[in-house]
């Protein structure tokens, strides 16, 4: 929209925001005289500051919302009426004034608003959140996830209709992560509802991800309700894992790989296994239980490796078959290559190299590097379990990177299975960004 063609919307009270009258007023206001200061294209204009807070999109920029994508980028916004504060719930309207959604506003993020609801009649309050959380719990009940153990992601952000909110359950402890201004605003309400519906002994907050900075939110880490037990454990497909909710990575454990770890265990019998980026030993424990001949596990975190070894003891697995290395995987793989070590099954589950598409190129080189080395360390007929949890790398690009790595390693490889996150990490169809975890199981000739 041209900077010289301003408009000043005013938002009526939501009970009376009838379509026609409202649109007429917007048409009339479009011819109003400029009163605002010109701003950059991605900075929404200040609308009528005396009107009720409301976000107005630029002409034609309502399409992604109509497809029910829950993010509103600053560049799509024409103007913002009123004087909203970050975390406030605002109606979002198209250029003609039609209601599109209720969204949580964040003045400090490139994602200026995230949708709570598409229904104009909805009221965003404790009852709204109770119904959403109860719905997410019901979905997991239907999927039978608790049959696999007492660990579960109970709220998976956008894909559960609660943008920015992650809640993981480890036995009777809940760990919540608030990733944007909306859940930050409703923090106490959300904690009360979780307490009411699940009666945990503790709700612990791990709002310390790097993403918080992009949202202009300070990092926070601590108890929200109850008392944190000394030892937290999660059971998973008959194995037990110690979880460090306060200091461990993410919320303490990687629930998303549950089914993929189980698949590795099924194929580990009599194999020499290499588990890279092993964290607290997830894939390693499944491989040991699955009858692996040997399991070499590598991670750069000494704390994670200590917990991993505790986990071997906790499950009475044969520690003589397990070797642990505290090292940088990029260097360790080169050393193993130079030592001519060979494996039958290799797992590569690195951290997020590309949080967004902007990092894709650099991340692609890192993925190619470790996968190329992985292929070289496999014996003929060996299996490579390779993952990316980068939101900035999609399935197609990941497969292309792996194909390039196989070519350069001089191996012929087949995809024998494509893997994703476990079902308690659903992907909303209208939010493909939710499909962050992708994995390939490859067999080399
Ligand atoms: N596979 C694990 C989760 C892996 S998370 C599971 O199933 O639980 C990624 C791990 O990579 C973290 O433990 C982190 O400490 C480790 N890491 C990150 N960069 C690394 C590097 N360059 N070399 C070795 N480990 C690294």
Image: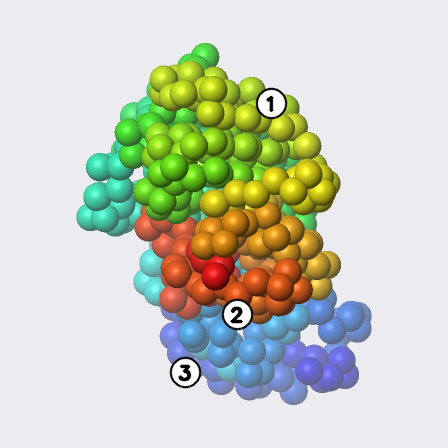
**Badge 1 local density, few (<14 within 10 Å), some, or many (20+)?**
some
Between circles 2 and 3, the one closer to the viewer is 2
Q: Residue at x 50, y 54 (%)?
A: 380
Residue 122, quarter of picture: bottom left
| Residue projecting furthest to the top | 230
Q: Is residue 10 visible?
A: no
Which residue is at the front of the view, 273 or 172? 273
Left-right relation of 89 to 337:
left
Q: Residue at x 59, y 48 (%)?
A: 377
Kindly report the distance in space between the C-alpha atoms of the residues bearing marks 2 and 3: 45 Å
Asked if the residues shown at circle 2 and circle 1 are in contact, with their CB atoms under 8 angstroms apart, the answer is: no
Above or below, comparing residue 16 to residue 267 in the picture: below
Q: Which residue is mark 3?
A: 20
Which residue is at the front of the view, 176 or 81? 176
Q: Residue at x 68, y 39 (%)?
A: 339
Expressed as whole percent of the image width and height from the top left, the position of residue 329 reads 66, 40
Q: Which residue is mark 1?
A: 303
Residue 311, quarter of picture: top left
Expressed as whole percent of the image width and height from the top left, the position of residue 266 reads 32, 42
Which residue is at the front of the view, 418 or 383? 383
**Badge 3 local density, few (<14 within 10 Å), some, or many (20+)?**
few
Among numbered discs 2 and 1, the one appearing first in the sequence: 1
Q: Secondary structure at mark 1?
A: helix
Asked if the residues shown at circle 1 and circle 3 are in contact, with their CB atoms under 8 angstroms apart, the answer is: no
Dividing the image into 4 quarters, which one contains the N terminus?
bottom right
Above or below, comparing residue 125 to residue 152 in the picture: below
Q: Which residue is mark 2?
A: 396
């Amino acid at each position: 929209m041209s900077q010289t063609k301003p408009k000043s919307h005013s938002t009526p009270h939501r009970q009376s925001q009838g379509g026609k009258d409202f649109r007429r007023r917007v048409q009339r206001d479009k011819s109003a005289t400029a009163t605002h200061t010109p701003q950059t294209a991605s900075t929404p204009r200040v609308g009528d500051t005396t009107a009720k807070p409301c976000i107005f999109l630029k002409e034609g920029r309502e399409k992604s919302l109509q497809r029910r994508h829950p993010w509103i980028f600053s560049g799509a916004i024409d103007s913002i009426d009123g004087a909203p504060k970050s975390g406030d719930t605002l109606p979002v309207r198209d250029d003609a004034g039609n209601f599109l959604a209720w969204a949580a506003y964040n003045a400090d993020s490139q994602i200026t608003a995230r949708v709570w609801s598409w229904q104009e009649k909805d009221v965003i309050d404790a009852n709204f959140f109770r119904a959403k959380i109860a719905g997410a719990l019901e979905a997991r009940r239907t999927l039978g996830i608790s049959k696999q153990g007492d660990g579960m992601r109970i709220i998976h952000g956008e894909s559960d209709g609660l943008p920015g909110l992650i809640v993981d359950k480890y036995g009777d402890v809940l760990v919540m992560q608030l990733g944007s201004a909306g859940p930050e605003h409703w923090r106490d309400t959300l904690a009360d509802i979780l307490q009411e519906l699940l009666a945990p002994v503790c709700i612990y907050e791990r709002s310390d991800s790097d993403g918080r900075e992009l949202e202009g939110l300070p990092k926070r880490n601590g108890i929200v309700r109850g008392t944190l037990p000394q030892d937290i454990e999660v059971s998973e497909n008959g194995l037990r894992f110690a979880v460090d909710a306060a200091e461990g990575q993410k919320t303490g454990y990687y629930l998303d790989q549950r089914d993929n770890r189980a698949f590795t265990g099924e194929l580990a019998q009599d194999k020499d296994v290499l588990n890279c980026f092993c964290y607290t030993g997830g894939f390693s424990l499944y491989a040991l239980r699955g009858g692996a001949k040997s399991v070499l596990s590598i991670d750069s975190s000494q704390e994670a490796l200590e917990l991993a070894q505790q986990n071997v003891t906790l499950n009475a697995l044969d520690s003589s078959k397990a070797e642990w290395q505290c090292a940088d995987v990029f260097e360790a793989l080169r050393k193993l290559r130079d030592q001519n070590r060979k494996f039958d099954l290799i797992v590569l589950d690195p951290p997020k190299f590309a949080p967004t598409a902007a990092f894709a190129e650099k991340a692609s080189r890192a993925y190619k590097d470790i996968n190329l080395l992985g292929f070289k360390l496999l014996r003929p007929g060996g299996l490579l379990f390779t993952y990316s949890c980068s939101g900035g790398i999609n399935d197609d690009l990941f497969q292309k990177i792996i194909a390039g790595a196989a070519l350069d390693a001089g191996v012929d490889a087949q995809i024998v299975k494509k893997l994703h996150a476990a079902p308690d990490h659903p992907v909303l169809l209208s939010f493909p960004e939710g499909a962050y975890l992708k994995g390939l199981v490859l067999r080399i000739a």
